[in-house]
Image: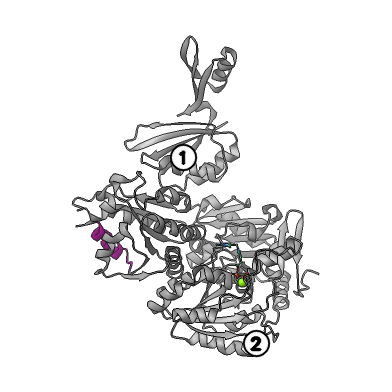
């Protein structure tokens, strides 16, 4: 799992531009988190892909986009996994390393869940 | 000031004195102001051609060409032309009409989401949603198109933005980001590799044409006694009559150039993206590569370089020149110049029907030293690329990346507008020309005397060749028959025309085309069976050549 983090102009169409580069390079995006960030008018996109080579290809392409201010591959120590899980008793939040969240989901077997990776 | 006036002011400030366009409802506010503006509007007959014209214009002047189309179908018609400009890194500005901001997304009359459609085929694009940003975004469009690796930029203009009053414009131009970082940290390694090379080869791509650094490249080649080859897009960056210049590499390239590519020990690749039609399978490239590109994303994309240098081709080459030691040519240089002579075959062919090679030969012989040749796509294009002698200040313009049939005529018109004093010839195929023949009307009405040299084989010749070579001669959907009569067609448009069926008529028809002060079409009936050979297919497992009549013995 490789995590790419970027700061982008918070404008309409920016997601389409960013995702378009993954489509062009036929790379599946495994997880994605997007949100406002500390810089006014900018947003941070954190997404993950399976392989290093894909991440490198994507970073090269993303660096050419006018609306991408900054883009980097984030090393593992800065990764953070989240999951929202639910079963008949209600819902719960899981936070931790990728392995921790992964194994919690494996052992608790929630009915439904969504899992993603963030990084700073 | 109305939005449309703001736009015209930006065009003026950016030095735009001609635009290629076609009106429609959404653009009428702009056209109303364009009527009395100091900008020449060339009314095309199909929007795709407006984009190709702007592209041809840009390739000649190395500054933005501007095209415009109305919302919906007008804008979608631009797509092929913009995609062509994108793949060949041409700075085209596309202005498209759009329905008013208030009804965008409602499937209004003539609404298309052209903003989304253009994203993957432009360097960047804008949809103006606030008139205050109009002037600023337009200026940004021009600077983005011309910064780093050039490329097309589209600006979507909702109708109300053109009509409303722009009182307080927001300034602060978007700073172009281009994936271009000048990075010369590996320059010493590059110099060292070149100095120690026994069999160097300089490979010149389209980037060198845009950078206009042909003379620098020749200077470097002479200093290190290196032969020079070009890609399809690099053709005409360096004069092909220079003794070190071997000609074009690639699938339809020259044997001697491909041979040099195979045999060299150090390859200095300048502004080329190692496309599959040039290098074949990237793994077939086993030499040490020094790769210079203004777009650092190209470095290692297809072929992994030993040394990578990011930056403008001209700047990097001049830096190399300032530090490298000159050296004398040895066995390699001598052998290459010998092989070059062996590779030059006689094209003055007397055959009847006329051989396409002979047509190109006559063009090379008669065209002025600064002529511009554009091409369509197919055999016609490859005959021109392989055989045309791009000597002196001649320029060769071809849709290398997208392979767009129908590019040549409009690009020639755009080129002629950019350089009215130069002779401009479109080397056309009959299939390609029919896709855009309506632009003959534009050439006539706007008095743009281009010369269409039609290699008429009544076929989609390249399709036929591929079916012959790779599909067991199972010919299908390649015969165009004998319609139309191109001489009559040209005359219907008011274009002067003459036919050459017999080789003895050829020279005079071509001379007439070159000297004509009106648009001219030479309908040359060529040998329908002639194939563009040799064809070279480079693969990891080895190189395969379909030689045809090519008698080159260089490899032994
Ligand atoms: C717009 C477009 N459609 C289809 C093709 C595929 N194609 C490549 S060459 C060719 C035949 C071109 O015929 P013509 O213009 O007569 O040139 P010739 O090969 O006969 O010289 C075709 C159909 C293309 N390159 N562009
Ligand atoms: Mg043909």
Quick check: is B9 in the magenta stretch? yes
Q: Which image quarter is the N terminus of chain B in?
A: bottom left
**Image height of B393 relative to B229, above or below:** below
Residue B440: x, y in percent? 45, 75
Residue B551: x, y in percent? 77, 75
Residue farthest to the top, as pictured: A89
Quick check: is B459 in the magenta stretch? no
- Chain of the residue under label 2: B
Instruction: Give left or right: position of B142 versus B2.
Output: right
* Contact (Cβ within 8 Å) of mark 1 with mark 2: no
- Element under label 1? strand
Instruction: Give left or right: position of B51 versus B131.
Output: right
Q: Residues within 10 Å of mark 1 (few under 14, many from 20)?
A: some
Dominant secondary-structure state across the stretch colored magenta: helix
Instruction: Give left or right: position of A118 versus B168.
Output: right
- Chain of the residue under label 1: A
Q: Residue drawn 53% across and 35% down?
A: A29
The residue that disc 1 covers is A71
Q: Quadrant of residue B401?
A: bottom right
- Of B435 and A84, which appears nearest the observer? B435
Q: How many marks?
A: 2
Residue B361: x, y in percent? 62, 82
Q: Quadrant of residue A33?
A: top left
- Of B10 and B512, which appears nearest the observer? B512
Residue B225 shows up from this direction:
no
The residue that disc 2 covers is B503
- Element under label 2? helix
Where does the magenta region start and end?
B3-16
Per the rendering, the mark at residue B475 is none
């Amino acid at each position: 799992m490789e995590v790419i983090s970027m700061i982008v102009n918070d404008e309409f169409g920016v997601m389409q531009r960013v995702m378009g580069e993954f489509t062009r390079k036929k790379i599946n995006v495994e997880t994605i988190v997007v949100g406002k960030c500390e810089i006014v008018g900018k947003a941070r996109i954190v997404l993950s892909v399976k392989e290093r080579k894909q991440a490198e290809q994507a970073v090269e392409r993303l660096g050419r986009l006018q609306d991408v201010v900054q883009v980097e591959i984030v090393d593992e120590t800065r990764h953070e996994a989240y999951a929202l899980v639910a079963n008949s008793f209600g819902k719960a939040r899981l936070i931790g390393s990728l392995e921790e969240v992964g194994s919690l989901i494996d052992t608790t077997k929630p009915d439904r869940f969504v899992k993603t990776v963030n990084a700073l | 000031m109305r939005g449309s006036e703001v736009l015209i002011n930006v065009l003026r400030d950016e030095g735009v004195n001609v635009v290629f366009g076609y009106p429609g409802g959404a653009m009428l506010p702009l056209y109303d102001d364009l009527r009395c503006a100091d900008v020449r509007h060339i009314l095309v007959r199909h929007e795709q051609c407006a984009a190709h014209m702007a592209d041809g214009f840009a390739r000649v002047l190395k500054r933005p060409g501007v095209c415009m189309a109305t919302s919906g179908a007008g804008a979608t018609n631009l797509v092929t032309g913009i995609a062509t400009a994108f793949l060949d890194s041409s700075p085209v500005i596309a202005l498209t009409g759009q329905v008013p901001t208030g009804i965008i997304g409602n499937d209004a009359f003539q609404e298309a989401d052209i903003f989304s459609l253009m994203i993957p085929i432009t360097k960047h694009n804008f949809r103006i949603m606030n008139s205050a940003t109009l002037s600023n975004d337009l200026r940004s469009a021009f600077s983005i198109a011309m910064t780093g690796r050039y490329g097309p930029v589209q600006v979507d203009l909702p109708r109300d933005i053109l009509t409303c009053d722009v009182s307080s414009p927001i300034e602060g131009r978007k700073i172009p980001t281009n994936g271009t970082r000048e990075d010369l940290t590996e320059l010493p390694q590059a110099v060292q590799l070149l100095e120690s090379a026994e069999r160097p080869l300089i490979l010149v791509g389209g980037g060198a044409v845009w950078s206009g650094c042909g003379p620098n490249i020749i200077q470097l080649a002479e200093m290190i006694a290196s032969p020079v080859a070009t890609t399809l897009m690099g053709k005409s960056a360096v004069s092909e009559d220079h003794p070190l210049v071997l000609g074009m590499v690639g699938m339809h390239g020259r044997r001697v150039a491909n041979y040099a590519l195979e045999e060299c020990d150090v390859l200095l690749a300048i502004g080329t993206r190692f496309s599959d039609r040039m290098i074949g399978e990237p793994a077939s490239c086993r030499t040490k590569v020094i790769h210079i590109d203004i777009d650092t994303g190209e470095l290692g994309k297809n072929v992994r370089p030993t040394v990578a240098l990011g930056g403008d081709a001209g700047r990097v080459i001049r830096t190399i020149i300032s530090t490298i030691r000159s050296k004398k040519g040895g066995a390699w240089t001598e052998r290459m110049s010998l092989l070059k002579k062996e590779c030059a075959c006689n094209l003055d062919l007397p055959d009847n029907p006329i051989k396409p090679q002979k047509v190109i030969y006559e063009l090379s012989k008669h065209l002025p030293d600064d002529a511009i040749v554009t091409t369509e796509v197919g055999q016609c294009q490859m005959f021109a690329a392989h055989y045309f002698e791009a000597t002196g200040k001649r320029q060769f313009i071809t849709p290398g990346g997208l392979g767009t049939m129908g590019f040549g005529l409009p690009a020639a018109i755009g080129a002629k507008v950019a350089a009215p004093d130069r002779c401009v010839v479109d080397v056309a195929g009959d299939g390609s020309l029919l896709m855009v023949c309506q632009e003959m009307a534009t050439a006539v009405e706007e008095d743009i005397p281009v010369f269409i040299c039609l290699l008429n084989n009544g076929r989609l010749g390249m399709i036929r060749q591929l079916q012959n070579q790779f599909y067991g001669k199972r010919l299908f959907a390649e015969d165009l028959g004998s319609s139309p009569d191109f001489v009559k067609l040209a005359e219907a448009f008011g274009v002067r025309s003459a036919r050459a069926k017999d080789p003895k008529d050829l020279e005079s028809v071509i001379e007439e085309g070159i000297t004509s002060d009106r648009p001219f079409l030479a309908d040359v009936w060529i040998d329908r069976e002639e194939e563009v050979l040799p064809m070279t297919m480079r693969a990891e497992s080895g190189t395969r050549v379909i030689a045809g009549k090519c008698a080159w013995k260089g490899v032994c």
